[in-house]
Amino acid sequence: MPKMKAAIFVEAGRIVLDEKPIPDIGPLDALVRLTTTTICGTDVHILKGEYPVERGLTIGHEPVGVIEKLGSAVTGFKEGQRVIAGAITPSFTSNACMCGCASQDGAGTKHGFKAMGGWRFGNTIDGAQAEYIRVPDATANLSPVPDELTDEQVLMCPDIMSTGFSGAENGAIKIGDTVVVFALGPIGLCAVAGAKLLGATTIIGVDTVPARLAVAKKLGCDHVVDFKAGDPVEQIMAITDGRGVDVAIEALGTQQTFESALRSLRPGGTLSSLGVYSTDLKIPLAAFSAGLGDNKIVTSLCPGGKERMRRLMSVVASGRIDLTPLVTHRFKLDDIEAAYDLFAHQRDGVLKVAITP
């Protein structure tokens, strides 16, 4: 049986490059030869054992590549075509999809808690940090890459861009809103860009890494707050003349950033949570106004499907946003263990890495 190289979860603390069979495909699937992929913060949660997956699973959920083989029932595509697929791969036939929440397609119990909806790559099926990937429900999930766009221009679309934008969208940002984004990693930076596209006119970014603060300004931040320079909520209140923000986007997944986001809201404001949390959250009584503040707390899993990917690539092609500066390091698949070491320890100013088989 033909083999391929793949980044495989062995145990907590160990993702290694090894060989495994090239995936078989069924009638609804496509086999895609990967040309570029990346490592996500969620992959680091898997590496650390904070999010459980089966041993032997190929990790990764951000595929850019070329169709190698099509299942007999897949329509609208051809072999040799450049494509991406979203990190979320809904069937569009499930109850969740029929209820209008395609990202939650397939949500169910896994390892004692609710799995992350339609997130299958590198979660419940083999993922994208490999030479080949099987894309399920390919007609609904593959999206052609325009010839004028490079792999790195569309690399953020499958997850990081889609997730950051969904945090802004689910926050129901309106023209003239004031928005704060807590944590300016790749997802937070995309949330900044999404907030600007939706019409926010005052955007505040919270972080402490100078390079991230600089990129945030380029993507649309009007103010940056260094949380090491003092209480970030006090700084936000000073910027807003004590009013608070209309929307706070939490993009890290810690108790501290969640609380700070909640405390920074105006009465009736919305906390849009994007972080992946690895421990229980507590809602402080005062920050929650004892439940009487008319606030909203919403969560997001990035939407999937080919139409979502088409729209995001359309934004990139329009020139309204350029996310290529987020790719700070490049590795061959053969060196993915070194890439994980760099990314997991956030060394050398890393934002995102591009992995090429």
Image: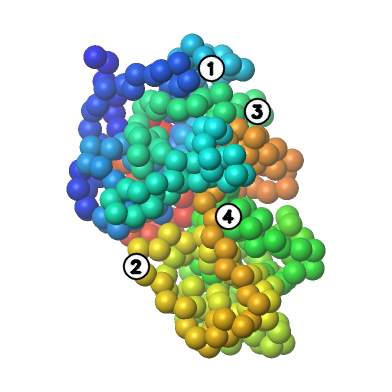
The residue that disc 1 covers is: 74
Q: How is the image coloured?
A: rainbow
Q: Where is residue 86 in the image (x, y as percent from the top left)?
A: 52, 38
Q: Position of residue 89 (x, y in %)?
A: 50, 36
Q: Where is residue 149 in the image (x, y as percent from the top left)?
A: 63, 32
The amino acid type of the residue labelled 2 equals Thr
- CA gap, disc 2 to disc 1? 41 Å
Q: Mark 1 or mark 2, which is nearer the start of the sequence?
A: 1
Q: Which-is-in-front pick, marks 4 and 1?
A: 1
Q: In which quarter of the image is residue 32?
A: top left
Neighbourhood count class around disc 1 (C-alpha, 10 Å): few under 14, some 14–19, many 20 upward: some
Q: Do the residues labelled 2 and 1 touch (CB within 8 Å)?
A: no
Q: Position of residue 314 (x, y in %)?
A: 70, 38
Question: Which image quarter is the N terminus in?
Answer: top left
- CA gap, disc 4 to disc 1? 30 Å
Disc number placed over residue 164 in the picture, else none: 4
Residue at position x 63%, y 75% in the image: 295
Q: Mark 4 or mark 2, which is nearer the start of the sequence?
A: 4
Q: Mark 3 or mark 4, which is nearer the start of the sequence?
A: 3
The residue that disc 3 covers is: 146
